[in-house]
Each structure stands twice: as C-alpha cells, then as structure tokens.
Image (cartoon, grey):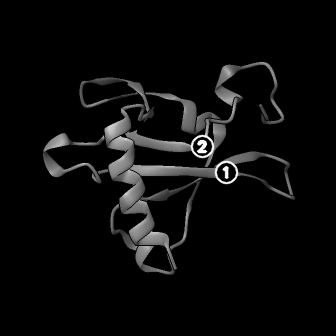
Amino acid sequence: MLKSNHMDSNQDTLPQKGFYYHFKHDDTKGVQDMAYEVIGAAKNTEDESISVLYRPLYVCDVYQNGKLSFSRPVGMFNDNVDKNGYIGPRFNRITDQALIQKLESICDGMYSK
C-alpha cells in the first residue's frame, strides 16, 4: 500500500478505495448524507505531499461545478476529530454490503457520464 512521504505513521497510509461516511453523517438524512467514494490519490508536484481524492455522493457545489472531486491530505483524511461531542475518525469506511450496493447505484447515477 502506498504511503505519503512521512512513512512513520498509520496516519499516512492511504485509505482503501471504496465508500466512506464523514463524521457529520446523519442517518436520518438518508444513505447519501455526507457519503463519499474514495477514488484514488494524488502527489503534489511541488512539495510531493500525498492527498486522497474522493467524490461526494450527494449534490453539493463540488458536484454541481463539473462533478469535481475533493482532495484532502492523507494524514487529515485519516485523522481523528474531537468536535461537538464526537471523538473518533474523520471518515469511517462503509462495510455493510447492502449499503455499499445502494451507494454504488447512486454513484453510477451521478457519475456515469
């Protein structure tokens, strides 16, 4: 598995491709709320830092402006947060197969063209 240029920490290990929920995900708002697909990684040509590339599975400005992707430094993607009573990972990998199938269908509809 690729790592960023700081090889001494699990924080720098690239996440697996797949579906993730941001810690702000709210089940009552549906399966798409704050759902993302990790699609790869990129290396900055200037400072050689590694970022995770991920795209939203809900309509937001990034999607509406050309179906662009988000980019976040790998360490920040893997980081834990302590906000508004939540302490835990910023992103949680989705492993439920039924949920993954729903998100794959949503993803196909949003990004098929």
Locate residue 70: give its quadrant.
bottom right
Q: Amino acid at mark 1?
A: Gly
Front residue of 97 and 63: 97
Residue 14, given in percent of the width and then of the height, sits at 68, 35
Going from the N terminus, do you reach mark 1 or mark 2 first? Answer: 2
Q: Is residue 37 left or right of residue 2?
A: left
Front residue of 98 and 33: 98
Q: Residue at x 43, y 59 (%)?
A: 56
Q: Residue at x 55, y 64 (%)?
A: 69
- Tell me the residue that label 2 is attached to: 17
Q: Is residue 84 left or right of residue 68?
A: left
Residue 16 can be seen, yes or no: yes
Q: Give the residue at the far left of this rendering.
A: 28
Instruction: Please state, as top left, top right, bottom left or bottom right, where the N terminus lies in the image.
Output: top right
Q: Is residue 108 left or right of residue 87?
A: right
Residue 23 can be seen, yes or no: no
Count of numbered marks: 2
Residue 85, given in percent of the width and then of the height, sits at 24, 24
Cβ atoms under marks 1 and 2 closer than 8 Å = yes
Q: Amino acid at mark 2?
A: Lys
For the residues marked 1 and 2, what is the alpha-carbon distance in whole angstroms? Answer: 6 Å
Disc 1 is placed on an element classified as strand
Disc 1: CA contacts within 10 A as few (<14), some (14-19) or many (>=20): some
Front residue of 38 and 80: 38
Disc 2 is placed on an element classified as loop
- Tell me the residue that label 1 is attached to: 40
Disc 2: CA contacts within 10 A as few (<14), some (14-19) or many (>=20): some
Residue 84, given in percent of the width and then of the height, sits at 25, 31
Locate residue 94: give its quadrant.
top left
Front residue of 106 and 51: 106
Q: Is residue 101 left or right of residue 4?
A: left
Q: Residue at x 42, y 31 (%)?
A: 95
